[in-house]
Amino acid sequence: MRAVVLISGSGSNLQAFIDQINAGQLDISIELVISNKADVFGLQRAQTAGISTAVVDHKAYDSRTAFDQALIDKIDSVEPKLIILAGFMRILTPDFVDHYQNRLINIHPSLLPKYPGTNTHQRALDAHDAMHGASVHFVVPEVDAGPIIIQGQMPILADDTASSLQQRIHKIEHQIYPTAVKWFANGRLSISDGRVLLDGENSVRQLQSLDV
Ligand code: GRF
């Protein structure tokens, strides 16, 4: 299955896909990695893996619509079935989201619907939550609100800080994101009434408690 990955940063989730593809555990081909920033480490990771890269700099466009259209043109040039947002830090227009309906997925560092938006680790600490986690979801126009494919969770420890949570959440992300992509690639996911079904069954969001 042909895929495109959109990044804005370090690309550790991209690396998790690359590692699983190279290990023969994930049957997708990443045709292109696109970043909206030129100097990010994720682009180097792609190049090291022999994957084509492109930069579409949002600052070169005078509107979100123009930027998103440039992204669409770039993405569609390689005809992917799946579009993966992996730390892509731009809000996408409803037109962009509609263009890729049910084949655009994102990972968010919280147990959605808790804490959409930014600062999720500090917000979980401030709320004295017992658990924290990450969610993979289909993208809908409302930010961080689409149908959830899989979630991974872990306990918050007494001495956790936003930064220690972020590090452990990354480990969770590197497990659940390739799993979600595998399900998608194997045709196991469908959406009914705004919920994700795995093999036709209500997946109870596939909440997994992970030891990280
Ligand atoms: C991840 O924490 C993801 O949840 C958020 O952005 C971060 C990307 O990290 N959307 P990386 O670039 O994959 O290392």
Image (tube, rainbow, N blue to C red):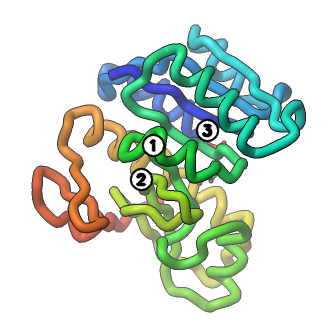
Q: Check disc 2 and give the amino acid type.
A: Phe
Residue at screen point 40% across, 28% down? 20
Question: What is the secondary structure assignment of the residue under circle 1?
Answer: strand
Vertical comparison of 76 with 114: above or below: above
Query: Which is more toward the observer, 127 or 100?
Result: 100
Residue placed under numbered mark 1 in the picture: 104
Tell me which amino acid carries mark 3.
Ser
199 and 100: which is toward the camera: 100
For disc 3, the marked residue is 12
Badge 3 local density, few (<14 within 10 Å), some, or many (20+)?
Answer: some
**What is the distance, in whole Å, between disc 1 and disc 3 at their CAs?**
19 Å
Q: Are marks 2 and 1 in contact (CB under 8 Å)?
A: yes
Where residue 67 appears, as percent x and y from the top left, is 74, 36
Q: Residue at x 42, y 56 (%)?
A: 137
Please indicate whether residue 161 sits to the left or right of residue 58 in the image. Answer: left
Of all residues, the one furthest to the top in this rendering is 50
> How packed is label 2: few (under 14 Cα within 10 Å), some, or many (20 or more)?
many
| Separation of marks 2 and 1 at Cα, in angstroms | 6 Å
| Badge 1: residue crowd in 10 Å (few <14, some 14–19, many ≥20) | many
Q: Position of residue 169 (x, y in %)?
A: 56, 59
Check mark 3 vs ligand 1: CB closer than 8 Å? yes or no. Answer: yes
Depicted 139 relative to depicted 30: above or below: below
Instruction: Give the CA separation, mark 3 to mark 2.
Output: 20 Å
| Marked residue nearer the N-terminal end (3 or 2) | 3
Q: Position of residue 61 (x, y in %)?
A: 84, 34
Q: Quadrant of the N terminus?
A: top left
The answer to whether 58 appears left or right of 50 in the picture is: right
Q: Give the amino acid type for the residue marked by disc 1 in the picture.
A: Leu
* Residue at the spot of label 2: 138
